[in-house]
Amino acid sequence: MPLVEKRMNTVADAYHPELGAAVDHLLSSGGKRVRPAVALLMGEMLGAQPENLVTLASAIELLHTATLVHDDLIDGSLLRRGIATLNAQWTPAATVLTGDFIFAIAAKQAAETNSVSVMRFFAETLAIIVNGEINQLFIGRGLASRENYYQRIYAKTASMFELASGAAAMLSPVEADVVENSRAFGYEIGMAFQIMDDVLDFISDESQVGKPVANDLRQGLITLPALYYLESKPDDANLIMDIQENRYNGVVMDRLVNSIRQSGAIDQSLDEARQHIDRALAILARLPEGPEHIALEELAWYIINRLN
Amino acid sequence: MPLVEKRMNTVADAYHPELGAAVDHLLSSGGKRVRPAVALLMGEMLGAQPENLVTLASAIELLHTATLVHDDLIDGSLLRRGIATLNAQWTPAATVLTGDFIFAIAAKQAAETNSVSVMRFFAETLAIIVNGEINQLFIGRGLASRENYYQRIYAKTASMFELASGAAAMLSPVEADVVENSRAFGYEIGMAFQIMDDVLDFISDESQVGKPVANDLRQGLITLPALYYLESKPDDANLIMDIQENRYNGVVMDRLVNSIRQSGAIDQSLDEARQHIDRALAILARLPEGPEHIALEELAWYIINRLN
């Protein structure tokens, strides 16, 4: 992992110094580095070259970082993980270009794995992520269904876990079915990861996470706990639209948030995340043995046990 | 070439319909398609697989298109080639994402050439282009030297011609020195192409090009003709800063533009473009024979003979 950090941190060395400062700022502002960890563990277990894996893991975390830079610009977010976003300090022009630059370096590093299949997978994942954001922008909040939610979190999160895990297998001396299973493992933990994020948005303490409870809902974004809650209230047809169009004032919204927190919707969502982890562990059991097995199991459990 | 158009036009088929409409709009708004033409001709001459070449040519024109989308957004340009830009019609968010999406598809197609060297070259070129834009954003108009100008037009234009020509050679059954020469050919015609663009900005008729004569200079951007002119007036030290800080009113600017047009600076610039073309033709003469030789020669001449 320190090698991955180093690989990420040297990206802007040959380029404009302001870029280097921006990249430093972005990379030092935390992040759990779950995606590169998945790539490293899966690849080590399957026998990939360590150097190649470090390059892949760095490329994936940079791709993730680049998408966050453009996301924060688009959403006008001024803070991420409690630290000022790039667009809070820079002009939109510089922010767009810095995101583009990080995309370019991510693609360059992906190409340095010397694997055409990894490159294709990488580019396809970027297309899926961006297409997901465009969908959200256009159909936006119009469709509040679980089907739509699953598509959204696949594009936003699970696709990149799939890439981390599947591309690590592609760099390993294994058969196609192992690549397929590795990819499926990434998919399952990625879906669980985003569902947990969405549950935590409801059940976390405001003082811990630095943003109000049910921040998504307050911004009109309906995630899994709210969807389960709404499914249990089929008579209240206006509820969805009222939320999406921000028709609630603080007091009414607080009451709705409390109703959701106290309803069975939280447990239903947690249960669904657990089902993804169960499937991930079943897939893992079919993958070749290796000392990283336990670490990957722990990582899967961490995803549904983390508090933030 | 029709196959390239087709390949570009199908990019958004599997994605959101609004994206398809945006991509259609961008691709139908003209463009000389010089970069894909270079890739096709060079690759055919050197014996590359036609299908691979079409994929490469499409990837390059899409990369070019994606950079234009973000450029126009950054510059706030509302028209390109007389047609409304994306950002003139869409929100900044949608424009950023559409550019990202086209980058993703360009990278995907580059990966479909199945060549790791092409992929690397592709990603490196994107990094050079974006880094050039970032340089311009930060050091901006502070440095008016020919050295800075050459770096700028290399990043902005010649790097992509280098890619078109060099990557086509990489897809061909040729030795490393042929790839090197092919790349150098692209570099020379690319430099000539941008110098000619900058000369045409001074000598074109406003009614023909749809923007005022010396549009760049009026926006504080100093290109080769202005640089040669300023070099001939070493006593007038404030001139550069006055231009860069837009201190001139229309009448004074018109007088300056006329002085440049009537000075030797235009011929000096044209001469420099011709020297690049001469070098390109000398390199071409060293490349393997083929019926595409004549077409590449004509393309090189076209670059310095075109009126727009």
Image (tube, coloured by chain):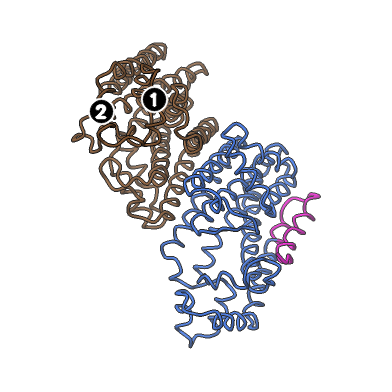
Chain colours: A brown, B blue
How far, Cα to Cα, is label 1 from label 2? 31 Å
Q: How many marks?
A: 2
How busy is the neighbourhood of tag 2: few (under 14 within 10 Å), some, or many (20 plus)?
Answer: few
Q: Quadrant of residue B299?
A: bottom right
Identify which residue is drawn at 52% across, 18% down.
A176
Name the one closer to the observer, B126 or A154: A154
According to the picture, the residue beneath numbered tag 2 turns out to be A255
Q: Quadrant of residue A274?
A: top left
Name the one closer to the observer, A167 or B291: A167
Q: Going from the N terminus, do you reach mark 1 or mark 2 first?
A: 1
Name the one closer to the observer, A161 or B46: A161
Answer yes or no: are tags 1 and 2 on the same subunit. yes
In magenta, the rendered stretch is B281-308
Q: Main secondary structure of the magenta part?
A: helix
Q: Estimate the x, y position of residue A260 in percent, counting from the top left.
A: 29, 23
Residue A190: numbered disc? 1
Residue type (three-letter) at the residue carrying disc 1: Gly
Residue type (three-letter) at the residue carrying disc 2: Arg
Label 1 vs label 2, nearer the camera = 2
Name the one closer to the observer, A300 or B147: A300
Q: Estimate the x, y position of residue B87 in percent, counting from the top left.
A: 53, 52
Q: Check the residue under mark 2 and report the chain it is in.
A: A
Identify which residue is drawn at 70% across, 62% down.
B303
Question: Relative to A9, does residue B304 appear above or below in the rendering?
Answer: below
